[in-house]
Amino acid sequence: MESPSPDAQRSSLPWHRRMALNVLTPWLAPIIWDGTFNISTLDTQHNGTRIGLFVFAVKKYIRFLLPLLESAERYFMVGHKVTYYVFTDKVNEVVKPKMAEGRILQLHNVIADQRWEDVSMRRMEILTIFTKTQMPKEIDYLVCTDVDMVFNDHVGVEILGDLVATIHPGYFLAELEEFPYEHRPISAAYIPYGHGDFYYMAALYGGKVEEIYKLSVSCHEGIEEDKKKNIEAAWQEESHLNRYLVYNKPTKVLSPEYIWNHDLPNGDLIKKRRFLAVAKNHQEVRN
């Protein structure tokens, strides 16, 4: 018997599990899938828009920086003005890729924390500083990404918006109660059971600089509040990010096309794989 088509599989899923496959959220923000935007029109509208890409590359993660930047030159905001904000403890080891006109690489020295969890959370602290001081003078929108990723297909101005988050590809068909939110009331990242919309991944989010400032301040304050209690949210900065987005709805949501891992199930539903996780030994690179 022939396997059901992806469309048939969609229709057979319970409604609440299909929500991520829609093109609108319940609060009427667009969910960006292939075919839901006209890139020519959007490119024209964003002529002159200044875009930043924020990335941390410390310790052993420096090995992923050049492949990320080279892939960004092929696929990320092609034809637009882009400033790469790279924060690293190994400035002298950074290899600059060949870059198109109007694209700038900024290197910023940062001290690497001992634990990878602290490195992860440090990003919010850095964001609070730069989105208040330097970035408002240089860019209009900021996109924040993990470094151990590569662009694999077009990622353009269709992802720009006031506040943009990406659905976690491992949970896009999961039930609400399966989301790995922080459910302990003692944590500043606490989300009560039954609350929430999607589970978002901290590997790709963005928005207008002033909105990322608000987000980073809230998340950083939550992280510091937890430290004072000698606790840590379940998934560090990602938990605080999800808490913020539950109560400050994103104005645009990116589908799992925009973050994917080849090892994940339900890949037949993902026609474009625009931003891919790099295969690696997590234990080796974190230690």
Image (tube, helix red, strand yellow):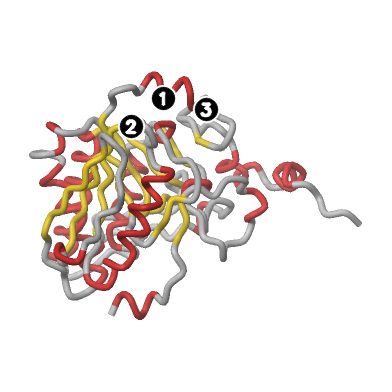
Query: Which amino acid does the dot numbered 1 rest on?
Result: Asp
In the displayed structure, 58 sits above or below 283; it is above
Q: Residue at x 45, y 30 (%)?
A: 29
**Mark 1 or 2, nearer chain start:** 1
Quarter of the figure that contains the C terminus: bottom left
Quarter of the figure that contains the N terminus: bottom right
Which label belongs to residue 223?
none
Q: Is residue 6 left or right of residue 165?
A: right
Q: Residues within 10 Å of mark 2 (few under 14, many from 20)?
A: many
Question: Residue 174's quadrant in the figure?
Answer: bottom right
Q: Residue at x 11, y 59 (%)?
A: 109
Q: Residues within 10 Å of mark 3 (few under 14, many from 20)?
A: few
SS under mark 3: loop
Question: Residue 229's quadrant in the figure?
Answer: bottom left
Tag 3 residue: 37
SS under mark 1: helix
For the residues carrying marks 2 and 3, which lies nearer the camera in this image? Answer: 2
Give the alpha-carbon distance from disc 3 to disc 1, as whole Å.
11 Å
Front-lying residue, 18 or 118: 118
Q: Where does the image place residue 155, in percent across and percent down from the top left? A: 44, 40
Query: Which amino acid does the dot numbered 3 rest on?
Result: Phe
**Mark 2 or 3, nearer chain start:** 3
Q: Where does the image place residue 65, in percent across and percent down from the top left? A: 30, 60
Give the alpha-carbon distance from disc 1 to disc 2, as whole Å.
8 Å
Q: Is residue 260 left or right of residue 66?
A: right
Tag 2 residue: 80
Tag 1 residue: 43
